[in-house]
Amino acid sequence: MITCARVRVLLEAFVDGDLAADDAARVRAHLSTCADCRRQHDQAISLPFRLRALSSPVPGPSLVGDVMQAVGAERGGYRRSWTLLVPEAVLAAFILWYLSGLDGLSSIASGVFGDLLSLGSGSLPHVPPVDVLLLVALIALVVVAAFHLSILVRLASPRPAHE
Amino acid sequence: MSELRRRPWAWLVLIGILAVVGILLAIIDISIAGKWPTPFAEAVVGPTVVQQESGKAVTLRFDRSRAGERVIFAPPFAGFDPISPYQALRAFLTNGAGLIILALAALVAFPSRARSAVERLEARHGVEIALGAGTVMVLLTLAATTLLRFTLLFLGVVPLVLLVSLLAALFGIACISLAIGRLLHRRLGLASVHPLVAALAGALVVFDLAVIPYAGVFALAAVAMAGLGLAVVTRFGSSGGWTFVDLNF
Amino acid sequence: MHAHVATDAQLMTELPGSKALAAGQLAHRATGGDLDAFEELIRRLQRRVYGFAFQHLRDAHEAYDLTQEIFVKLYRNLGRYDSERPFEPWFWKMATNTTINYRRKRVPLPSEPAEEAADPDARMQPHDPTLVEALAQLDPSYRVPVLLHYYADLSLEQVAAALSLSVPAVKSRLHRARGVLRNSLADAEELGRP
């Protein structure tokens, strides 16, 4: 004869359908006779049922459209990020040629560090004369590269940009 | 055969193979340097020790055994440097261990960030995005630094930018090591193992790539660029990425 | 009102078997680049996912954003789906991870009215406000397994896989969560509804 205490212990598993068949039969038999345990059982069973019956607002027709738009934007962004490599390569090649190859680039690099060291010693470094064309090319490369990077960041970001 | 692979010690075997391959490649690197010099190999494996003891009193702090001078073999073909397995082992234990320790430390220090970055790397076009972002970052940094040279603006920023780039590349290489480890786990059907062990195998793969003669420097540059790109594009693996939402208040 | 609840309940407990095969096939075709299959797939999933997100975040805007994030992540990770395995557990594991890592865009105000809702349905009163309130006060690490098991109708094994826990751990969390919920419900019912 199963006791009320034992039934209380088994009640959770019984409500979830996890009990073995003979245990479940014994609990069911007890519940048909014991009003207290039946009340406990009704309380226990109501929670899963209420959880399952929870209603939520409908997301609205725009959700699927927004997601497909974000997916399309991702595909377009990926294609665009490849094509942007072309102007970047052109600008970089032009700058390298203008600076007479890697020697020019390394002289600039050593100049940067020389300037930094002279900053430490207190005297202001002097600005080397520079061609406007070179400045324009450098600024263009910075702008294109920054734009390219923003596209790649959007491809990697978890949030789709729907603003 | 597949049951053998499920055992955890399959990972040990894999790591052992990768370590041996790394040492062999380092040996080849040292030996080839005589005939076709490669400055990068010098940087990775160190200069070859060929001179005999000179009789002077010399303080030996780091190489008391001087085993390097005793374990040198004659090169198989004329013109090559002598084969020095001891030096290769030393290079493996210093540079290889350094890379592995840095990678594992980054993973231990920033586990959720690493996971977020690796998730993006393993998702659609992840590798292309990382490599592309690395290339763009290099171009951007070079162009911006050159511009600063001509305008004298914020010169002090340059060392900071280089330092941040180095940290970003290290974080990225750590994530790439973990990703390679996970790839080995999936493709070779190995048993599940502690993620740091997988990352260790991945870091060894990166080291082996770096130590390949001649092509290694390009491989390492590619991995470093991909790591830098990955770190920048995912904002060091933050859960929200780069966003202006917080500024909009 | 009852019919609405009934359809919702029916959707929640719809036989997973008949839909799962189709969902897996859709996912397989979407992986091959079929955008129509992907659209159909998210059309089928959107109510459950949005419902799950809404019950977890209690804010229509945030739930919308989280649902979008989950679907974009689905698109990006389609290549990692193994069509030999069932689709639902894999999908819900990914959705759960995204939910747990989701950073709210703004601090949720508990009594914020949904005046900017795109559709009039969003302004309807939840038919079980005490339970909804009790859920909102539950700790997220308890709320997620409750929602996964009872609301999204995943089995205990699927919930365990989604949360990277053992089945006994999931059971104990559900047990504790149910206890907390019952206490809150009993308190609320004692105070009487306003």
Image: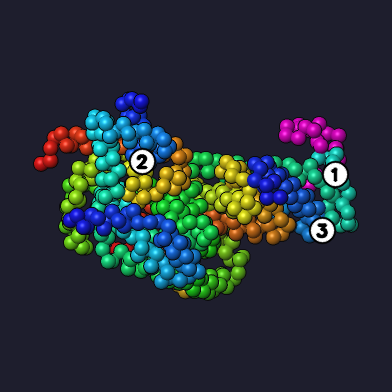
Which label sits on residue B220? none
Identify which residue, B138 or B20, lies in the foreground: B20
Amino acid type, callout 2 = Asp
Q: CA distance from mark 1 to mark 2?
A: 73 Å
**Callout 3: residue from which chain?**
B
- C63 left or right of C92 in image: left
Residue A89 visible, this angle: yes
- Is A8 above or below relative to B220? above
Q: Quadrant of the N terminus of chain A?
A: top left
- Residue at numbered disc 3: B35
Describe the element under mark 3 as helix, strand or loop.
loop
Q: Are marks 3 and 1 in contact (CB under 8 Å)?
A: no
Describe the element under mark 1 as helix, strand or loop.
loop
Identify which residue, A143 or C99, lies in the foreground: C99
Where is residue C97 shown, x and y percent of the image?
A: 42, 49
**Callout 1: residue from which chain?**
B
For marks 3 and 2, give the one nearer the viewer.
Answer: 2
- Residue at numbered disc 2: A16
Packing grade of label 1 (10 A; few <14, some 14-19, many >=20) is some
Residue at image position (81%, 40%) is B68
